[in-house]
Amino acid sequence: MATYKTVKRECLIDFLKSHSKYSFTVREIAAEMSSDNTIKSVPSESTVYRLMREMEREGTVRRYIDPKNRE
């Protein structure tokens, strides 16, 4: 499957790089990105889910499942 380098994907990657010391739920990522006025193209929550799933398959990000949290 081809990987497209969209503006929203690049914004998400930049966000994750600048917050690499933290772990987030997808909902938290979408909320943080929405509240940041410096991000030029904020992806929707569903887009963040899709992009994170793609990046996990590629090995770009790792999924961490917190047994205390179902999000």
Image (tube, rainbow, N blue to C red):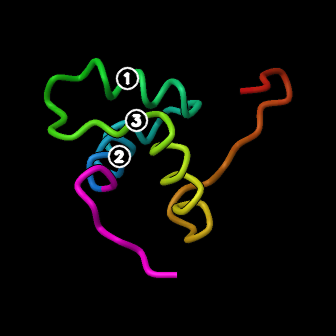
What is the distance, in whole Å, between disc 2 and disc 1 at their CAs? 11 Å
Does residue 37 appear to the left or right of 17 in the view shown?
left
**Above or below — where is 21 with respect to 61?**
above
What is the distance, in whole Å, between disc 3 and disc 2 at their CAs? 11 Å
**Above or below — where is 19 with respect to 56?**
above
Q: Residue at x 32, y 40 (%)?
A: 15
Viewer-proximal residue among 17 and 37: 37
Residue 43 x/y as whole percent: 35, 40
Mark nearer the N terminus (1 vs 3): 1
Q: Quadrant of residue 62?
A: bottom right
Residue 42 x/y as whole percent: 28, 36
Does residue 29 appear to the left or right of 25 in the view shown?
left
Determine crowd level at label 3: few under 14, some 14-19, many 20+ residues with C-alpha closer than 10 A. Answer: some
Q: Amino acid at mark 3?
A: Ser
Viewer-proximal residue among 44 and 39: 44
Q: What label sits on residue 44 in the rendered view?
A: 3
Does residue 10 appear to the left or right of 56 in the view shown?
left
Residue 35 x/y as whole percent: 28, 18
| Residue 20, magenta (yes or no) | no
Determine crowd level at label 2: few under 14, some 14-19, many 20+ residues with C-alpha closer than 10 A. Answer: many
Q: Name the residue beneath numbered marker 1.
A: 32
Segment tinted magenta in the rendering: 1-9
Q: What label sits on residue 12 in the rendered view?
A: 2
Q: Residue at x 43, y 29 (%)?
A: 30
Disc 1 secondary structure class? helix
Q: Are marks 3 and 2 in contact (CB under 8 Å)?
A: no
